[in-house]
Image (cartoon, grey):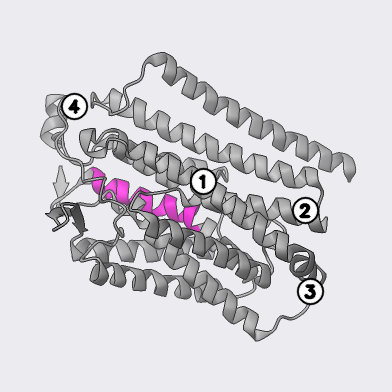
């Protein structure tokens, strides 16, 4: 069934993705900004972030010919009629097969529950995997490319964090820690807001695809003189206006609650509530996203880049400055990795199992033993994470 030309599950999926991705992913980008500006009214921070959202939408529309996903959906077309999708007669009359199906909207719904537990799930994998694995020959190889690019992003971010903080930790981070309660020069506030705006722009260019994948779009392929094929994706301006309004309202909710559960990950890291430390983190993170955005149009997990940067930073600061114990820093890093793995396992599991329940063919055809193994790995990772958390709490109680 459609409403004003849009399938009902496309609307449901878009709304769920808009909220869950804002609650999970955007806070990993704006988390240091919220943490270091906790004393400012939330609506001031919201107006700043909202102005950048509007600017990115306008720039994407003008610069990319209506493609506000910035090329990230060039290889993931809007779903068409799926052969083999079973429908009871009463269901087929209400919702004929084709376009966005009910199973496309399930991952963002799952993301809502994962966000409640503070798990930094990769929304790129959780939302786009099901499109990549059910798109037939059109999306063949996309999942592998996304995984490789995201792993590379984690390693590059980890290395960048380690190298930068190897250079600055002994002086900069120690100075930040020792002068935390003092008033900061106005220049630091200007630099932090500029670095946040820069990072926020780069994140939106990478991850808007995770939200707009649910909305109809036109795809045009043009053969260039050198024989290569150029793909141009364009969205209807009505959808863009609607989506922008929805995102602004949801961001207001997140800013009013100061980030929710995911914000706790940022707050556990050394000095992230300090405006000077947050400035450096945001600038490095934004630069890494810019480099990978320009590399190719394959979507990638910004969450993995975020965790890699914080891991390299945290371990280097701990090794050189000794603001916290090595055990505590390693626990944080391993715990974040386990959360990311849980998200990846769940993403692939949902993308394989749910379409099968609907009778839709999947590009990745594996047997029940592999599915069971994937489920077991997910529960094992979750068990390890909760065991580590319990051990940490016991150690804190014993030392207090």
Q: Which mark is residue 115?
A: 1
Q: Residue at x 46, y 70 (%)?
A: 49
Magenta-span inclusion, residue 15: yes
Compared with 334, 267 (above or below) is: below
Q: Residue at x 79, y 64 (%)?
A: 170
Q: Which mark is residue 202?
A: none
- Dot 4, how many residues are within 10 Å of its Cα: few (below 14), some (14-19), or many (20+)? some
Residue 264 in sight: no
Q: Which mark is residue 181?
A: 3
Q: Quarter of the image holding residue 104?
A: top left
Between disc 3 and disc 2, the foreground one is 2
Which residue corresponds to mark 2?
318
Q: Element type at marker 1?
A: helix
Gap between marks 3 and 2, in whole Å?
A: 21 Å
Gap between marks 2 and 1, in whole Å?
A: 28 Å
Residue 242 in sight: yes
Mark toward the start of the polypeptide (3 vs 2): 3
In the image shown, does 239 or 285 lie closer to the viewer?
285
Q: Element type at marker 3?
A: loop
Q: Residue at x 57, y 39 (%)?
A: 339
- Dot 2, how many residues are within 10 Å of its Cα: few (below 14), some (14-19), or many (20+)? some
Gap between marks 3 and 4, in whole Å?
A: 61 Å
In the image shown, does 399 or 367 lie closer to the viewer?
367
Mark toward the start of the polypeptide (2 vs 1): 1
Q: Element type at marker 4?
A: loop
Compared with 204, 13 (above or below) is: above
Magenta residues (range): 9-26
Measuring from the top left, give residue 2's x and y in whole percent. Answer: 15, 46
* Left or right of residue 291, residue 364 in this image: left
Which residue corresponds to mark 4?
85
Measuring from the top left, give residue 17's x and y in whole percent. Answer: 37, 49
- Dot 3, how many residues are within 10 Å of its Cα: few (below 14), some (14-19), or many (20+)? few
């Amino acid at each position: 069934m459609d409403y004003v030309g849009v399938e009902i599950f496309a609307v449901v999926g878009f709304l769920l993705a808009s909220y869950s991705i804002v609650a999970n992913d955007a806070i990993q980008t704006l988390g240091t900004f919220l943490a270091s500006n906790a004393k400012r009214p939330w609506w001031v921070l919201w107006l700043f972030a909202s102005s950048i959202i509007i600017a990115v939408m306008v720039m994407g529309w003008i610069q990319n010919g209506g493609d506000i996903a910035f090329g990230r959906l060039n290889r993931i077309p809007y779903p068409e009629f799926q052969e083999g999708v079973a429908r009871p007669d009463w269901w087929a009359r209400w919702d004929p097969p084709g376009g966005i199906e009910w199973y496309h909207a399930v991952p963002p719904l799952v993301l809502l529950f994962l966000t409640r537990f503070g798990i930094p799930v990769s929304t790129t994998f959780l939302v786009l995997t099901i499109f990549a694995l059910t798109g037939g020959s059109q999306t063949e190889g996309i999942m592998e490319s996304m995984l490789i690019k995201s792993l590379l992003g984690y390693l590059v971010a980890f290395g960048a964090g380690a190298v930068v903080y190897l250079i600055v930790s002994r002086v900069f981070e120690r100075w930040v820690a020792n002068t935390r309660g003092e008033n900061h020069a106005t220049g630091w506030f200007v630099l932090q807001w500029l670095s946040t705006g820069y990072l926020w722009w780069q994140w939106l260019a990478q991850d808007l695809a995770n939200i707009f994948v649910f909305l109809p779009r036109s795809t045009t392929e043009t053969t260039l003189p050198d024989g290569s094929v150029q793909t141009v994706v364009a969205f209807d301006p009505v959808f863009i206006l609607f989506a922008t309004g929805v995102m602004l309202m949801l961001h207001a909710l997140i800013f009013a609650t100061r980030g929710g559960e995911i914000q706790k990950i940022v707050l556990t890291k050394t000095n992230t509530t300090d405006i000077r430390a947050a400035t450096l983190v945001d600038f490095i993170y934004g630069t890494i996203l810019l480099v990978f955005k320009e590399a190719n149009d394959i979507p990638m997990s910004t969450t993995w880049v975020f965790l890699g940067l914080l891991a390299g930073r945290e371990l280097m600061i701990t090794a050189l400055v000794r603001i916290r114990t090595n055990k505590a820093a390693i626990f944080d890093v391993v715990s974040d990795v386990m959360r990311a793995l849980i998200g990846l396992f769940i993403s692939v599991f949902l993308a394989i199992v749910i379409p099968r329940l609907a009778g839709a063919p999947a590009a990745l055809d594996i047997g029940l033993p592999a599915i069971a193994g994937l489920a077991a790995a997910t529960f094992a990772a979750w068990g390890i994470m909760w065991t580590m958390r319990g051990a940490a709490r016991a150690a804190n109680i014993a030392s207090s």
